[in-house]
Image (spheres, rainbow, N blue to C red):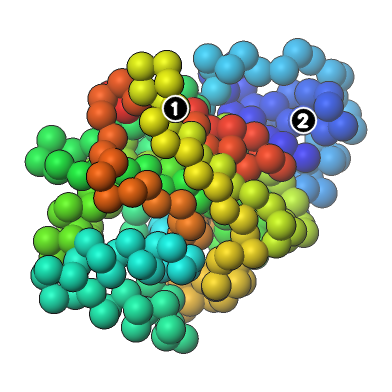
Amino acid sequence: MKLYRSRQGVLAEHDSRFYPVAVSSFDDLLTRENLRDHLMTLIGKASTVNGPEPQNLLAPIGSQEVWAAGVTYYRSRNARMEESKSAGGGDFYDRVYQAKRPELFFKSMPHRVAGPGAKVAIRDDASWSVPEPELTMLVTPKGRIAGYTIGNDMSSRDIEGENPLYLPQAKVYDRSCALGPCLLVSDEPLPAATEIMLEIRRGGAVAFSGATSLKEMKRKAEELVEYLYRNNSFPQGCFLLTGTGIVPPDSFTLERGDEIGITIPPIGTLTNVVG
C-alpha cells in the first residue's frame, strides 16, 4: 500500500485504486504502530477517487525529524576517504565502515524538506555538490519500521572534505533534503535485490546516471534503527536515510537547473530540480 500526501488531502493506493484517508493530521497516521492495518480499515469504508495530481504532491512527512546513516556502502566509504584525505581524515571512514557502531547524524527538520517536483538547493559557499539517493525508512515512536520512501541527502563534498567536523554544514541547510513521492507502507523488509537508480539531467541530456541495490548495503536496517533509538526518543517517529551506494565521479558537481531523478521501483521516482 502507498500513502500520498498532497494539497488535495491524504490518499492511499491499494491494488491500483486510490482512496481518501480522513485524518486530523498526518502525524496521526505516521505515529501509529499498526499503520497498515489502520489504513486497511479506513479504505474499507471509503469510495475510490482519482489519483493525486503530480504537481500537488507534498513530501510524505509531518513533524518528524529526519536522520541519516553514512558509510553504509563500500562506494560511499571510498568516496569519503578520498575527499577527506588531504585533511588527515581519510582513515576515519574506513574505521567507521568496519566498526560495530554506525555513523548516524541529524539531517533535517520538516521545514527544510523538499517534496516531489520541488527545488532542492546547493550551498552558495560550496564548489562541489552532489545528490545522494537513499532508501529512507519511516520509524514509529517505538522503533518499528513501518514504511519506506525515497530520500535525497544533498551534500557539499568540498566542505566535508575540508574537515570531517564540518559535516553538519555540508549536510544541513535549507532544501538539503527531499522525500517522496509517497510512503510505501509495509510490514515486510524490502528484498535485497531492490534497485536504487539515479539520473541527473542537464540541458535535456543525461549528465550522470548510476545504480546500486540494497544487497550492497553493509548495515542492516534494524541495526541502524536500534542504534538511533539508543538513549533517544522520537514521540512523532522519525525518518532515517540509510546511506548511498551511488557517488558521481570527483569531476562532477551539480549546477542550478539540473534535474535529479531517483527511482526505487517499489516506491516510484522522486524528481527535483536544483534551484
Q: Amino acid at mark 1?
A: Val
Instruction: Name which of mark 1 and mark 2 comes first in the sequence.
Output: 2
Find residue 263 and report its image quarter. top right
Can you identify the residue that label 2 sits on? 13
Residue 154 in view in this figure: no
Q: CA distance from mark 1 to mark 2?
A: 31 Å
**Closer to us: 73 or 183:** 73
Q: Amino acid at mark 2?
A: Glu
Which residue lies at the image location 33% right of the left edge and 62% below the top edge?
Answer: 79
Find residue 220 and report its image quarter. bottom right
Which residue lies at the image location 42% right of the left edge and 16% below the top edge?
Answer: 204
Badge 2 density bin: few <14, some 14–19, many ≥20, Cα 10 Å: many
Can you identify the residue that label 1 sits on? 206
Please give left or right for residue 121 compared with residue 127 in the image. right
Give the vertical position of 24 relative to 169 (above or below). above
Give the vertical position of 80 relative to 275 (above or below). below
Say if mark 1 contacts mark 2, CB within 8 Å: no
Q: Position of residue 149 (x, y in %)?
A: 59, 44
The quarter of the image holding the C terminus is top left
Find residue 167 and report its image quarter. bottom left
| Secondary element at image label 1 | strand
**Closer to us: 76 or 8:** 76
Please give left or right for residue 158 compared with residue 63 in the image. left
